[in-house]
Image (cartoon, rainbow, N blue to C red):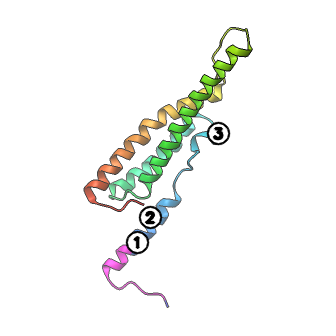
Amino acid sequence: MKKIPRTTEDIVTNLVIILRIFIYMEMIPIDWYIQSPIDFEHKQYVLFAYLQRVDSTYLNKIVSPHLLHLEKLETEILGFKKNLKELESDLKKQRYLYFDNDPKNVFDNDKIKELVDIVEFSIPQIHSRIQIGYKIANKYKQVIY
């Protein structure tokens, strides 16, 4: 038989658990910036909608699980940016070895440029929410999961 919450503390604890489950279900995927459609304006709206949900949980002094998810997003985006630069550098080196034509920008593709713009725009937005999350976690002493 289920235990029925009898005290206010039990009710609040159950509500917090339900709220955290609900919040967790509303996270954006780690690879949200490379999913279709690749459109800067659309990705701005997706990111801002997610960050608005994060901000609302931060206002309630709840940082988990969004804080760790934001860190994972930032790590993924920074890794993508680093790998893209390495790929561009490697392709330029190979281009000089095998082709005699004039060097051009390796990534003249509009979608790649759009991805770079999305990544460049997203990094400071996500990083600022991470910093705010840690300030809240330190001030209100929470377990981060």
As shown in the figure, which amino acid type bears the numbered disc 1?
Leu
Query: Which residue bears the numbered disc 1?
Result: 15
Q: Secondary structure at mark 1?
A: helix
Query: Which residue bears the numbered disc 3?
Result: 37
In the displayed structure, 106 sits above or below 67; it is: above
3D distance between C-alphas at marks 2 and 3: 29 Å
Q: Magenta segment range?
A: 2-13
3D distance between C-alphas at marks 2 and 1: 9 Å
- Residue 108, can we see it? no
Q: Residues within 10 Å of mark 1 (few under 14, many from 20)?
A: few
The tally of labels here is: 3
Mark found first going from the N terminus, 2 or 1: 1
Residue 132: where, in percent of width, then height? Answer: 33, 47
Residue contact at pointers 3 and 1, CB within 8 angstroms: no
- Residue at image position (47%, 42%) is 74
Q: Secondary structure at mark 2?
A: helix
Q: Is residue 128 magenta?
A: no
Q: Residues within 10 Å of mark 3 (few under 14, many from 20)?
A: few
Q: Secondary structure at mark 3?
A: loop
Q: Is residue 9 magenta?
A: yes
Farthest residue, direction front: 97
Q: Quadrant of the C terminus?
A: bottom left
- Residue at image position (72%, 9%) is 101
Mark found first going from the N terminus, 2 or 3: 2
- Residue at image position (54%, 33%) is 81
As shown in the figure, which amino acid type bears the numbered disc 3?
Pro
Query: Which residue bears the numbered disc 2?
Result: 20
Of 20 and 71, nearer the camera is 71
As shown in the figure, which amino acid type bears the numbered disc 2?
Arg
| Viewer-nearest of discs 2 and 3 | 2
Q: Is residue 10 left or right of residue 24?
A: left
